[in-house]
Structures are given as C-alpha cells and as structure tokens.
Image (tube, helix red, strand yellow):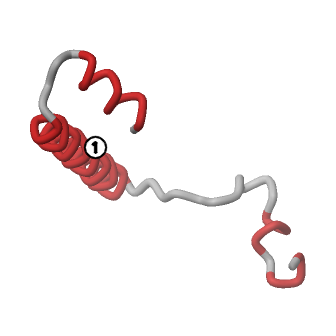
C-alpha cells in the first residue's frame, strides 16, 4: 500500500484524491473477493486450509 501511495503522490494527486482512490481500490478488491466466493460457493468448491493429502494436519491429535 505504501508504494501505491508514493506513486500517487508522484503523479501529482492531492492527499484527498489519493485517499479516495485507495478506498476505491480497496472496495474493488472486496467486491472481487465477494464475487469469487459466490462463484466458488455456487460451484460447490470449498477452501481447505490443508491439502486433502494431509488429513493428519487437521486432526486435534496432531497439535
């Protein structure tokens, strides 16, 4: 994020415009994440923190 802010200042934008642009980019990213999740849910895909080949990593005994 810091690099993005620096680049925006170099382009001659005011801090207010930079803040508005950053907020817009964050909202876009959130919307993309929501859309991706909706698509995944619609396809019946699930996110698994561990690959299926490693079921032992998810078991309580492994901890």
Provide residue 27's location: percent of width, then percent of height.
19, 48
Residue at the spot 25% in from the left edge and 25% down from the top edge:
9
Quarter-wise, where is residue 54 in the image?
bottom right
User: How many numbered circles are shown?
Assistant: 1
Residue placed furthest toward the right? 62
- Which residue, given by chain and number where applicable, does mark 1 sit on? 29
Local crowd size for mark 1, using a 10 Å CA cut-off: few (<14), some (14–19), many (≥20): few
Q: Nearer the viewer, residue 60 or 17?
A: 17
Say above or below: 9 vs 49. above
Provide residue 2's location: percent of width, then percent of height.
41, 36
Provide residue 42's location: percent of width, then percent of height.
29, 55
Horizontal side of 21 relative to 10 (left or right) equals: left
Residue at the spot 36% in from the left edge and 51% down from the top edge:
40
Residue placed furthest toward the top? 11
Q: Which of 10 and 31 is in front in this view?
A: 10
Residue at the spot 81% in from the left edge and 83% down from the top edge:
60
Secondary structure of residue under mark 1: helix
Name the quarter where the N terminus is drawn. top left
Quarter-wise, where is residue 45 in the image?
bottom left
Residue at the spot 59% in from the left edge and 59% down from the top edge:
48
Q: Which of 44 and 51 is in front in this view?
A: 51
């Amino acid at each position: 994020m810091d690099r993005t802010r620096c680049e925006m200042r170099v382009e001659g934008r005011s801090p207010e415009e930079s803040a508005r642009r950053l907020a817009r980019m964050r909202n876009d990213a959130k919307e993309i994440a929501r859309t991706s999740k909706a698509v995944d849910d619609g396809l019946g895909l699930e996110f698994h923190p561990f690959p299926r080949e490693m079921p032992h990593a998810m078991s309580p005994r492994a901890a």
